[in-house]
Image (tube, helix red, strand yellow):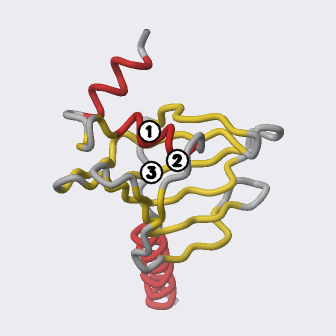
């Protein structure tokens, strides 16, 4: 009997570890980036990665009527040429839990003018390059 309980506990522990490791890490530092008719957009400053003229980051879209998270996306913006690629998408259900996730090929798209994406680009890029120390810049910008 004790052996069966130990095996059951080990199986439950393995399942728990699998789910913990398969869920992306969400930072606690989300900053408001844009407001459009279809949603509010927030950028996670804790997981911003800079490589050359590219900035990779997570953006969360929120339904403006319900306040519920619609999706979380991992994107890369090339500051030098004003293009964006969506690398990963997590779609959320009405209760806020992730209901679908998928990864994209790196298809680059021109950033449309007057879009939420352009507002995010202005936060993360300056003069065709990623902003220096983006996290500190965002903290300073939104602490006023």
- Across and down, in percent, residue 134 comes to 28, 35
Which mark sits nearer the N-terminus, 1 or 2? 1
User: Which of the two residues, 130 or 63, is positioned nearer the viewer here?
Assistant: 130
Which mark sits nearer the N-terminus, 2 or 3? 3
Q: Can you tell which mark lies on residue 107?
A: none
Kindly identify which residue carries mark 1. 28
In this rendering, the label closer to the viewer, 2 or 3? 2
- Across and down, in percent, residue 49 comes to 26, 52
- Crowding at dot 3, Cα within 10 Å, few <14 / some 14-19 / many 20+, comes out as few
Residue at (64%, 64%) from the top-left corner? 91
- Describe the element under mark 2 as helix, strand or loop: helix
Which quadrant of the rendered structure holds the C terminus?
top left
Residue at (70%, 43%) from the top-left corner? 39
User: Which of the two residues, 52 or 11, is positioned nearer the viewer here?
Assistant: 52
Residue at (43%, 77%) from the top-left corner? 18
Q: Can you tell which mark lies on residue 26?
A: 3
In three-dimensional space, the C-alpha distance between marks 1 and 2, rounded to whole angstroms, equals 21 Å
Left or right: residue 54 compared with residue 142? left
Q: Can you tell which mark lies on residue 117?
A: 2
Number of numbered discs visible in the structure rendering? 3
For this orientation, the residue located farthest to the left is: 52
- Crowding at dot 1, Cα within 10 Å, few <14 / some 14-19 / many 20+, comes out as few
Left or right: residue 130 compared with residue 57? left
């Amino acid at each position: 009997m004790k052996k069966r309980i130990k095996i059951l506990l080990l199986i439950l522990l393995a399942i728990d570890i699998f789910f913990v490791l398969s869920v992306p890490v969400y930072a606690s530092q989300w900053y408001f980036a844009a407001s459009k008719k279809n949603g509010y957009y927030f950028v996670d400053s804790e997981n911003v990665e800079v490589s050359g003229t590219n900035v990779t980051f997570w953006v969360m879209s929120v339904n403006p009527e319900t306040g519920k998270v619609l999706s979380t996306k991992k994107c890369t913006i090339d500051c030098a040429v004003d293009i964006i690629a969506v690398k990963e998408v997590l779609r959320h259900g009405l209760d806020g839990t992730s209901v679908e996730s998928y990864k994209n090929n790196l298809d680059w798209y021109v950033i449309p003018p007057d879009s939420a994406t352009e507002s995010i680009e202005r936060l993360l890029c300056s003069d065709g390059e990623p902003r220096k120390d983006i996290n500190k810049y965002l903290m300073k910008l939104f602490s006023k």
